[in-house]
């Protein structure tokens, strides 16, 4: 079930999900207790307790202005099994746009700090943490709460950053690459000579999926994206780039591959899932993992939601059997209790990074105070790759002083002096 569709669920089911959320994986916290053993530690704890840290808070559902920059006092202290991370970069995901409109069921009600991924430096350890040390550079995956300067997260949700990886790249890895990897290899069973359709091919998941396809011999990638992005995605490995905004992508695919495709990744939902199913070859698989069709602007569009919900794909078991096709659903947010499963994927991804086979493409970086611009960039379909948020305050550009009148007049004299020297 997609996040957006959850918005249209009956109330009782929603309440059950809320229960489930509360019982699920640990969440980052903001106001913990400090336990200092020695005098020195006590002094450090009291200094840090008075310190403040910046965070982004979703204050209500609606437009860009609902995410506000706030300053909190008393940084989180890590509990047993947790580490305190000074965050250096965080990922913006499509789900964050949905969450702002109240369309993402894995984020609790406002006020809440969003953010599912990031990178930073371990600043303190909770009890019983033996595999991390202060100063470690880490990648973090969590359910929400990463959009803050300091965050306490379970050590098991952190992964050591490999040599040479930037904080921006590290923050681009978890959501996009885990999603792409599990869909292609675990559900898709991607093999040599397969053909794959990747929608939103210039976006975060799209670029990750394209790179992963290229790790397998002779995979043909069909990628949909706005026309201005085609050169970049072709350079990145897309074999056939399709402008879905000016033509029917299914017709375009059929012109090139009349028998259809082996794997289709469907982040759109609604009628596009049916279209994907029809485009599959026998033994083909569609993996549905989003409902981007519900998002038409900065504010909730009830008509688009109803249309997407009404056109949802549905099939009975007998028809499915006769079709020789598979329909899979993937949602990383609902795998948050599966730490070991997800960690194994991250290990594979970091190995591929070390071998130079995958490399996140950072589209742009925005400081926390510019979060509205960052969201607008993705919403208005301008990004090619990952949009990153930086907790550190934006430095004021030093104003260029106008040269004084006398200095202006002196300049020719300097040139004359140079000429004289020659
Ligand atoms: N289930 C999961 O676990 C999971 C995890 C991660 C992501 N996702 C899903 O994967 C999809 C991609 O996510 P992402 O974070 O990588 O984002 P992204 O692809 O970087 O998203 C932005 C791009 O999507 C394209 N787009 C297509 N329909 C759009 C719409 N209605 N509104 C705005 N942009 C639209 C635009 O590019 P073009 O115009 O060039 O197409 C835009 O530049 C989303 O549907 C997301 O919900 C699911």
Image (spheres, rainbow, N blue to C red):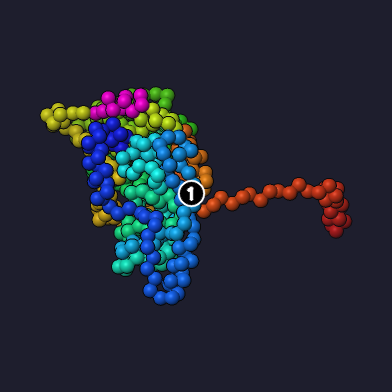
Q: Going by the image, does 320 lie left or right of 167?
A: left
328 falls in the magenta region: no
Dividing the image into four quarters, tell me where ligand 1 lies: top left
Residue nearest the observer in this picture, 420 or 320: 320
> Which residue in the structure is indicated by mark 1?
70
Instruction: Name the image quarter holding residue 250.
Output: top left
The reply to whether residue 403 is visible in this rendering is yes
Instruction: Name the image quarter holding residue 225.
Output: top left
The answer to whether the residue bearing label 1 lies less than 8 angstroms from the nearest atom of ligand 1 is no
Identify which residue is drawn at 83% across, 47% down.
405
Screen quadrant of the C terminus: bottom right
The reply to whether residue 201 is visible in this rendering is no
Local secondary structure at mark 1? strand
Instruction: Name the image quarter holding residue 302.
Output: top left
Identify which residue is drawn at 42% across, 24% down.
246
Identify which residue is drawn at 28% across, 52% down.
25
Q: Main secondary structure of the magenta part?
A: helix
**Residue 276: horizontal and vertical position, in percent?**
28, 30
**Residue 381: horizontal and vertical position, in percent?**
45, 34
- Looking at the picture, does residue 16 appear above or below residue 274? below
Residue nearest the observer in this picture, 124 or 344: 124
Which stretch did the figure color magenta?
A: 302-313
């Amino acid at each position: 079930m997609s996040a957006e569709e959850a918005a249209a669920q009956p109330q009782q089911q929603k309440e059950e999900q809320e229960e489930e959320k509360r019982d699920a994986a640990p969440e980052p916290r903001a106001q913990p207790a400090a336990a200092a053993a020695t005098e020195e530690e006590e002094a450090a704890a009291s200094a840090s307790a008075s310190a403040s840290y910046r965070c982004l808070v979703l204050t209500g559902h609606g437009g860009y202005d609902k995410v506000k920059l706030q300053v909190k006092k008393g940084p989180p202290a890590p509990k047993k099994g947790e580490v305190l991370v000074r965050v250096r970069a965080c990922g913006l995901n499509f789900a964050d746009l949905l969450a702002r409109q109240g369309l993402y069921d894995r984020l609790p009600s406002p006020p809440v700090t969003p953010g599912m991924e990031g990178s930073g430096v371990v600043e303190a350890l909770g009890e019983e943490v033996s595999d991390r040390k202060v100063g470690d550079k880490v990648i973090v995956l969590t359910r929400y709460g990463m959009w803050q300067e300091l965050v306490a997260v379970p050590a098991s949700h952190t992964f050591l950053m490999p040599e040479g990886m930037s904080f921006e790249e590290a923050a681009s890895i978890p959501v996009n690459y885990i999603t792409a990897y599990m869909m292609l290899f675990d559900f898709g069973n991607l093999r040599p000579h397969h053909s794959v359709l990747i929608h939103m091919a210039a976006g975060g998941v799209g670029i990750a999926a394209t790179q992963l396809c290229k790790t397998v011999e002779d995979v043909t990638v069909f990628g949909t994206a706005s026309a201005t992005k085609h050169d970049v995605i072709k350079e990145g490995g897309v074999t056939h780039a399709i402008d879905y905004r000016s033509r029917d992508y299914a017709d375009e695919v059929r012109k090139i591959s009349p028998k259809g495709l082996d794997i289709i990744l469907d982040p759109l939902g609604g009628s596009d899932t049916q279209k994907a199913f029809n485009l599959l070859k026998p033994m083909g698989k569609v993996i549905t993992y989003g409902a981007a069709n519900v998002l038409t602007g900065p504010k909730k569009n009830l008509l688009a939601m109803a249309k997407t919900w009404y056109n949802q794909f549905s099939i009975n078991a007998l028809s499915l059997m006769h079709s020789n096709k598979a329909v899979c659903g993937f949602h990383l947010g609902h795998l948050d209790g599966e730490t070991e499963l997800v960690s194994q994927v991250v290990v594979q991804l970091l190995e591929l990074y070390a071998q130079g086979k995958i490399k996140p493409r950072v589209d742009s970086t925005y400081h926390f105070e510019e979060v509205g611009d960052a969201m607008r960039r993705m919403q208005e379909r301008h990004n090619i790759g990952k949009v990153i948020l930086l907790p550190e305050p934006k430095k004021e550009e030093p104003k260029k002083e106008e040269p004084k009148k006398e200095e202006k007049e002196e300049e020719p004299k300097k040139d004359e002096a140079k000429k004289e020297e020659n």
